[in-house]
Image (cartoon, rainbow, N blue to C red):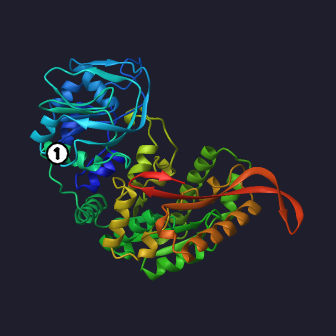
């Protein structure tokens, strides 16, 4: 994801595919360049993700990063050997002076980069030249139509990493044509080509950036009379969130109804402690609530409503599958799975291929207030996954009040916009404390404030 984000930031539209994506689909995408990403595997592992590099080279130039570099070397006549010591962390690299000058690279011959690998390329592939090296190992090579890079240019720790990615894209003769104006134009075209001229859309609102942007986009393209927004109070929202968000939506002209389903959600969550079970229970009930809204609250339009709109993002899609790069499923998302047959609705997801920062820019282009589009991410399952263990009303009250104090304090001290995400977590752990000169034995509330620097997160 980080590699794709970097390239999009540079203006190159990039998509992430599984290592086993069919050659037919890759050709259909018609890429200017292909990147084989890193991973924890060895090329000698029995179940390591393997791809025929030669067939990819028949489509476009290839860059291999970390494991991707080793895979290229392994298949193209080079040699990969087990490393005697794992190379991890900041390392200095030296570029081949001749190649560096010949290709007009815009960064110094020596600089610091971020390594993370065990195996090493011990012999260059056929018809390739050494591109750079560390004190002990080959760290990159180049041929007429492929490159290998042992370090990670996508992370902020690697100096001139973005410059290298830009260099590779330029080497592939790609044009930096992915601009935010195009994002809005593409989103509008997608909506018009997906939703029929007489069709109505049910838009599931969460109060967050993504669904708010989707609802505004759909309303702009289709008109408020065809876009029916539903905002559900699931009892897992922040303090006064339901009332505040409803007022904000009315202000920006959305056709929205509010549904109070707090008791239904708390009943569905009763006895559940596992976070994945909680996610699935919430997702299932969301669909049931929306179906009920069509049958009752939106009864006059139920025969016209053909689509359910969701604010699904690209990371949601990637984190919910296990085939991309041989990675594991990180978590399920209630807005990524299929819809029950009985709803007879199709999905419309205008921001499905966008990252969060791209959605924020799209919101700005649509004229949404900065206060709305700069809101910290808030999970679809809400406070249910910020309370470790079973959900109760008492725990929810504690979380809502604590979250309100924390976020208000950040805003008052002008720290809110410097932080990517801040939140509280109620832990099922009790500890001794002192309150009013007396001994207490209460639960622990953890506070987290996470900052993001070009994709790397620190607490």
Q: Is residue 117 visible in the rendered structure shown here?
A: yes
Q: Which residue is mark 1?
A: 105
Is residue 109 found left or right of 332 in the rendered image? left
Q: Position of residue 318 (x, y in %)?
A: 41, 44
Foreground pick, 62 / 51: 62
Q: Nearer the viewer, residue 1 or 458?
A: 458
In this view, the residue farthest toward the right is 438
Judged left or right of residue 326, residue 401 is right
Q: Position of residue 394 (x, y in %)?
A: 77, 62
Question: Total label count?
Answer: 1
Q: In the rendered image, is residue 298 in sight?
A: no
* Above or below for 378 versus 242: above
- Between 193 and 389, the residue placed more toward the observer is 389
Q: Quadrant of residue 61?
A: top left
Instruction: Left or right? Give the position of 313 relative to 414.
Output: left
What residue is rendered at 14% in x and 36% in y?
A: 99
Residue at 34% across, 72% down: 364
Find residue 301 and report its horizontal and vertical position in percent.
Answer: 44, 69
The local secondary structure at tag 1 comes to loop
- Quick check: 425 left or right of 203? right
Residue at far left of view: 102
Mark 1: give few (<14), some (14-19) or many (20+) Cα within 10 Å.
some
Q: Tell me if residue 26 comes above or below residue 260 in the rendering.
A: above
Tell me what residue is drawn at x 39 percent, y 65 percent.
214
Q: Position of residue 238 (x, y in %)?
A: 61, 67
For the C terminus, the quadrant is bottom right
- As drawn, the residue found furthest toward the bottom would be 251
* As drawn, 449 above or below 126: below
């Amino acid at each position: 994801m980080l590699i794709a984000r970097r390239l999009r930031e540079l203006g190159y539209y990039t998509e992430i595919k599984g290592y086993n994506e069919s050659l037919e689909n890759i050709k259909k995408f018609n890429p200017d360049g292909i990147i084989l990403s890193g991973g924890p595997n060895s090329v000698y592992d029995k179940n390591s993700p393997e791809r025929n590099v030669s067939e990819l080279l028949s489509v476009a130039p290839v860059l291999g990063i970390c494991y991707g570099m080793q895979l290229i070397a392994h298949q193209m006549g080079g040699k990969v050997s087990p490393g005697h010591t794992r190379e991890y962390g900041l390392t200095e690299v030296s570029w081949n002076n001749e190649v560096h000058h010949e290709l007009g690279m815009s960064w110094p011959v020596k600089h610091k980069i971020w390594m993370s690998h065990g195996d090493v390329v011990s012999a260059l592939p056929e018809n390739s030249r050494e591109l750079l090296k560390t004190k002990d190992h080959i760290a990159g090579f180049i041929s007429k139509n492929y490159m290998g890079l042992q370090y990670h240019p996508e992370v902020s720790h690697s100096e001139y990493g973005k410059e290298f990615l830009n260099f590779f894209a330029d080497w592939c003769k790609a044009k930096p044509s992915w601009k935010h104006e195009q994002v809005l134009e593409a989103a509008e075209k997608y909506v018009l080509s997906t939703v029929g001229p007489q069709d109505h859309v049910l838009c599931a609102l969460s109060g967050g950036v993504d669904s708010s942007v989707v609802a505004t986009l759909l309303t702009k393209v289709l008109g408020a009379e065809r876009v029916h927004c539903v905002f559900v109070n699931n009892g897992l929202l922040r303090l006064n969130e339901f009332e505040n968000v409803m007022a904000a939506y009315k202000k920006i002209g959305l056709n929205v109804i509010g549904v109070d389903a707090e008791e239904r959600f708390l009943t569905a969550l009763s006895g559940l402690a596992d976070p994945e079970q909680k996610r699935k229970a919430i997702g299932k009930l969301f669909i049931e609530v929306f179906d009920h809204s069509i049958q009752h609250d939106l009864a006059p339009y139920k025969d016209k409503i053909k689509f359910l709109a969701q604010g699904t993002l690209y990371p949601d899609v990637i984190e919910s599958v296990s085939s991309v790069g041989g990675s594991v499923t990180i978590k399920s998302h209630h807005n990524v799975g299929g819809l029950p047959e009985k709803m007879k609705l199709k999905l419309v997801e205008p921001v499905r291929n966008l990252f969060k920062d791209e959605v924020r820019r799209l919101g700005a282009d649509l004229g949404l207030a900065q206060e709305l589009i700069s809101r910290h991410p808030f999970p679809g399952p809400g406070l249910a996954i910020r309370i470790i263990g079973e959900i109760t009303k008492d725990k929810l009250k504690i979380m809502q009040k604590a979250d309100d104090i924390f976020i208000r304090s950040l805003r008052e001290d002008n720290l809110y916009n410097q932080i990517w995400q801040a939140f509280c977590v109620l832990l099922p752990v009790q500890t001794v404390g002192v309150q009013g000169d007396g001994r207490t034995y209460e639960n622990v509330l953890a506070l987290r404030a996470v900052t993001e620097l070009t994709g790397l997160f620190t607490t």
